[in-house]
Image: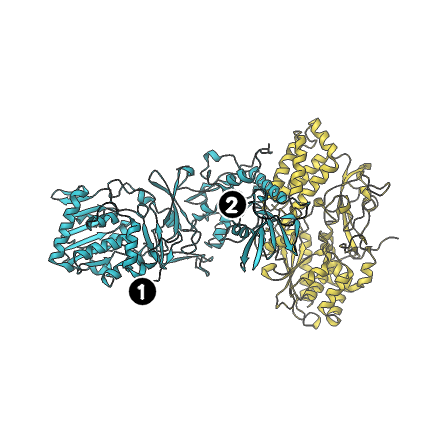
Amino acid sequence: MKYEPILLARIHKPNSHQLEGYRADGGYAAIEQALVDKKPADVIAQVKDAGLRGRGGAGFPTGLKWTFLPKDHPGPIYLCVNADESEPCTYNNRILMEKDPHQVLEGIMLACYAIRSEKAFFYVRYEYGTAYRALEAAIAELYAAGLLGKNIFGSDFHLDIVLHRGAGAYICGEETGLIESLEGKRAWPRIKPPFPAIEGAFRKPTIVNNVETMACVTQIMRRGIDWFKSLGVPPDPKNPRDAGSYGPKLYTIAGHVEKPVCVELPMGVSLRELVEVHGGGVWKGRKAKAVNPGGLSMGFVDVLAPLKGEDGKTEYDIPLDFNGPGKVGCLGLGTAAVTVIDDQTSMVDVLHNVTQFFSHESCGQCTPCREGTGWMLKIMERFRRGLGRREDLDILVDVADRIGIIPGTTICGLSDGAGWPVKTAIRKFRSEFEEAIRKGEPSRYAKPLQMVGAH
Amino acid sequence: MATVYVNDVPVEIGNDRLNCVQAVARAGQFLAHYCYHEALTVVASCRMCMIEMGDLKDGKVTMIPKVFPGCQTPVKDGTVIVTGDYAKRSVGHEPLPYDPKYVPGKLAKKAQADTLEGLLINHPLDCPVCDKAGECKLQDYSFEYGRAESRLIDPKNTPPNKPELSSKITLFTDRCIMCTRCVRFTREISGTAELMVKNRGHHEEIDVFPGRPLENRLAGNVVDLCPVGALGSKDFLYTQRVWYLKNTDGVCSLCSTGCSIHVDTNKEIVYRLRPRHNPAAQGHFMCDDGRWGYHYVNSGERIVRPMMRSDKGLSPVSWYEMLPKLRADLTQAAAAQPSQVVAVLSPFLTAEEAFLWGTFIKGLSPQARLALGPVPVVGEDDSYPKNVHGQPVEPTKFTIRAEKCPNRNGVSSVLKQLQGDVIPFEKIAGETGLSALVFVGGYPNREHLQAAFPPNWKAPAILVVQDLFSSSLTEQARYVLPGTAAFEKEGTFVNHAGLAQVFARAVRPPIEARGELQVAADLLGRKGLVQAAGVRKELAAAVPFFDGLADPPSPQGKRLELTTV
């Protein structure tokens, strides 16, 4: 049975980004109704009971995050919407913002009502000009229609949404980096605790949520808990800490596929199905070698490596829910942006590109990340010139292993993400690197990928 | 009472809120760090103070299997801290009941070595030409905690140096380890916020905003804060290797804050002043006026030998010849018109010098008068941090005082004791008919002195001047005696708040000079070399204000009860 998209249901409609069409499709009914017959705590409870986990990458339960706000705080409390979608090959938030901004904005209104916030900051990355303009227009429409500002729908709920455009830095997607950037400072992630829910933007309690999460909130409030829980993967009974992976999810497919696309599917689709069916298979009739299951920082899946304990299946068959990628040594689901690397592509070049990205985007605050990402890039540059050494592989794995919040050596998770692709690539494709060392040939590409963007 | 355990050593911390760096220090141990500084906010970015942490509860230790930055991690009752130095811990303490599989200190030790390896990746190996070598924390910790060999074979980043950063300070950009202490200093202590971080990742650099160089009166502190040789004082650049420097605890004499300082000297030459942490005086820092204001000591224009006026003008004379004549002149003048004999004791003198000189003059005749020398005041007190408009904001973290002398309080207290009141200098300067004036100065800046004299001031017949530099006063003097600078003597200064600080001699005075204290002792007819400590005892016995100095005070000094004088 073909899955009917919910979050992306409206994107192909003409003028899907306009208020008129959205209201005609039943838009803003959920918030209107919630303002009448639901208390903020009820909204939180509904989101919490639906089992919604944040779509930004870490998968933290959204409702639970909202309950971390201090009780009876005199305010103000802020909501920051993280639209700094900078993970390479990820564009699921962009589609929502460009094609159906009102779905997101309704989610923001619901979330703000739930957490008693009267001001939301919508942080859009610099590169998303179209999304920024779509949101700008949508917010203007809402103000014009009296759906933002004071006494929304005649209730005593007030809300202002401030649209903020970033300046082009990956680190602004880290929630405290985003807050610092929003405050007008250099986006250096803050040391935690205090977490933003206690002290965030402008030193006030702040919730930072992803764009797709907001869209999910809209749908949960509109369609109810049961609908949401009917999709996805229930918790693993063997893992008491697993909260399950419920709901629909936007997956983006990029890299060496026939049809790069953003699709909406219930959580837990297998990597193989996603690429072969929804992405139209690997391009040019080639075979996949490695796949990135959820944005660069999640590491690589070896398509041919057998899956332990499951006969005939390979790492290619892992389900893309919050637990699946972790079973094969990847960091997690991340942004669910699948990047395919075909069998004609050198992992040396791939890894060079990866290290270049993270060394360019490391904010430079913590020594292990600042110097580690730079060092890995220098080693990979040497590999590209055909001058790699066997001991470099050990150095790369050592450096990749020691940077990040998991070993405890950095403030934020950027360097976990910088280390993971390096160590998974070397551990899973070591023979290819050793072959490159033995041959000592420079890369077939004369130049590395050029940096593009606003910086 | 809260107890924390540092490498098995239990430490009582009471109700103090400490982080792990402080808790480890309480245990008498040391946790290496770069970015952490007591006076600045915690950023936990250098990742040098990595520790392992856990809890001791119900006789069981639960360790968390990762490392934590000690500076950011608060301790509470039962916190167990294991540092990378666990293997070097002092014996005699029972090991805590760790999990048998847990190897204490392994993770922390590796994390510290990893951090150092990272810091050295783009750090040039230019210790042989770096001024910081010898007192560089990167050298020290690399030696103590780092790996012996480098695994890097790729070229290092070589960003250009920035000598244009400031007129007084230069930046060796490639040496910087990005601890951002300097940036935080300019934002939090001086409030002037000239410094910033630009670029990202391993291309990060400290810089100033275009057209806004690092020029504020506290800027020199960033050189001390820099744990490596990145920020250098242009004044000290390439002058001395630090391991040749002799370090003496001193007190800055250029304003009434009386900053505690380190005086760094070599072969009787002062090369550098650095602040000495003293919460009772000024805290961690000092101002640039004081830091770079020591050059007068090394000046070639100093009065270096005693001189006496004859028909041919001033000519050098030996102390043996001069002192009996000087004493005879003064005795005679005091016998004739005792109240017309005046001694002016400058606020640059130590309390001991003022006391001995005062004793001598009052010994000539009780009616002889003592006056306080000109007190230089320049502008107004300058408090930091500043806001964007340059206005000081509370809470004040540093004040440069307008009163440009170190010991008005000390000298005034002596004068008050010896004659009941303090005669301000203006009164003496306005008097005519004095028979003898003894001016004991020590003014580093002769302009301050000359400004206090009316233009047509007429010197009395007997004018005795002991000072550092020649001035309009010495031109009229019958006796000119070489003075000594604050670095060339030992003694006590009492700062604006009544803090008495005893300091030692850092360098010898010019070879033919005798200190003010010695001259006074000679005139009093005391035999041999005078010791400031002995005079201090007399002072403590004679002047109630100085009671507290009978026993040698700590290097932090002693707060005395100020009365309005």
Q: Is residue A142 above or below residue A341?
A: below
Helix, strand or loop under label 2: strand
Helix, strand or loop under label 1: loop
Q: Is residue A230 left or right of residue B119?
A: right
Q: What label sits on residue B30 in the rendered view?
A: none
Q: Is residue A78 left or right of residue A331?
A: left
Q: Earlier in the sequence, mark 1 or mark 2?
A: 2
Identify residue for label 2.
B206
What is the three-letter code of the residue carrying label 1?
Answer: Thr
Res. A189 visible in picture: no
Q: Is residue B406 left or right of residue B175?
A: left
Q: What x and y, as percent, mark residue A426?
A: 71, 37
Q: Are marks 1 and 2 on the same chain?
A: yes
Identify residue for label 1.
B564
Identify the colour of chain B in the image.
cyan
Residue A18 falls in which quadrant of the image? bottom right
Chain for colour yellow: A
What is the three-letter code of the residue carrying label 2?
Answer: Ile
Q: What x and y, as percent, mark residue A417?
A: 68, 45
Q: Is residue B353 left or right of residue A89?
A: left
Mark 2 closeness class: few <14, some 14–19, many ≥20 residues within 10 Å: many
Please give the chain letter of the residue carrying mark 1. B
Q: What x and y, as percent, mark residue B85?
A: 57, 43
Please give the chain letter of the residue carrying mark 2. B
Farthest residue in the top direction?
A: A439
Residue pictured at 74% horizontal, 32% vertical: A431
Mark 1 closeness class: few <14, some 14–19, many ≥20 residues within 10 Å: few
